Image: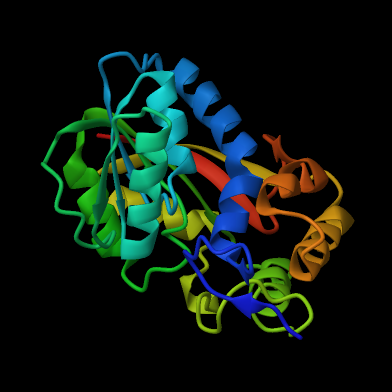
Amino acid sequence: MRPQIELDSPRPDTIDGRHIRAVAFRRARLEYLGRTLTSVGLSPAGRRALVVGGGRGPLAGDLARLGFDVVAVDPSERATATATETAAREGLAIDHRTAPAERPEVPAAAFDLAYYADTFEITDDLDGVLEQAGRALKPGGVLVYDTVNRTPVSRLVYLGAFQGFPGTRIMPPGRYAASRLRRPDELVEALRRHGLRNEDICDFKPRNPANLLKAVLARRRGAITDEQIPPIVDFVRVPDGSPLVTYLGYARKV
């Protein structure tokens, strides 16, 4: 019997590829965020952070634990409900809201930091998303992101293995499309159009790509949980690498 693929589902008998990505990317995201905060001299204490596309809440929770006052928006009502419950259980005062990245409905010039996750690679309106990001940030504010490059390898992984091939699927059909995967140069130009100056791009990938397949197959069999995936896949940052699949980056509001 094939496993049920369902996004934003807290049920253990479903495969939620979105959450799998969130937990697998978690350490790389935090390491890059810490490096970026040090680079720009931004201390979390007393600062406001916006998380867009945070899913069930692990990224928002990590920012809150660093000391940020966090607002998190996500287009999924189910993900927002789960994130709200998790934050309350962990004693974290996070304002979780349901809203699309194209219309987040947050105050203008209110945030020192914005982290966009699981967003750039699924939106058809990147310019609309970036316009809202620029609007939400204070002058000099920092936009951190991770997304998917458009290369033959990334198409094989995201359009093939994660979405198309029956034996390795973890996403529903249509979640990704080649037109929504952006090369770094395309993203840098889009950021510039909305008053956001890109300052860094960093490759990140599994230490051993074969372990990514191993983890996906084990999760589909129910042999491991989502939380057991990160040490198997072991995503690492490659600052000087040329991203074949995923990349991190940050920009400043001019």
Q: Whole-percent x and y of residue 126?
A: 34, 64
> Please, which residue is most extreme toward the left here?
107
Residue in view at x 39 percent, y 58 percent: 79
Q: Whole-percent x and y of residue 9?
A: 49, 65
Residue 252 figure quarter: top left
Residue 137 visible in the displayed image:
yes
Q: How many marks?
A: 0
Q: Whole-percent x and y of residue 58?
A: 49, 41
Residue 160 figure quarter: bottom right
Task: Note whether 134 is above or below 212 in the view shown.
Answer: above
7 or 73: nearer the eye?
A: 7
For the N terminus, the image quarter is bottom right
Residue in view at x 35 percent, y 36 percent: 88
122 or 126: nearer the eye?
A: 122
Task: Note whether 169 is above or below 210 in the view shown.
Answer: below
Residue in view at x 82 percent, y 60 percent: 223
Q: How is this picture coloured? A: rainbow
Residue in view at x 33 percent, y 54 percent: 80
19 or 151: nearer the eye?
A: 19
Q: Is residue 117 left or right of residue 245?
A: left
Task: Note whether 70 is above or below 105 in the view shown.
Answer: above
Q: Is residue 51 left or right of residue 58?
A: left
Residue 251 visible in the displayed image:
no
For the C terminus, the image quarter is top left
21 or 77: nearer the eye?
A: 77
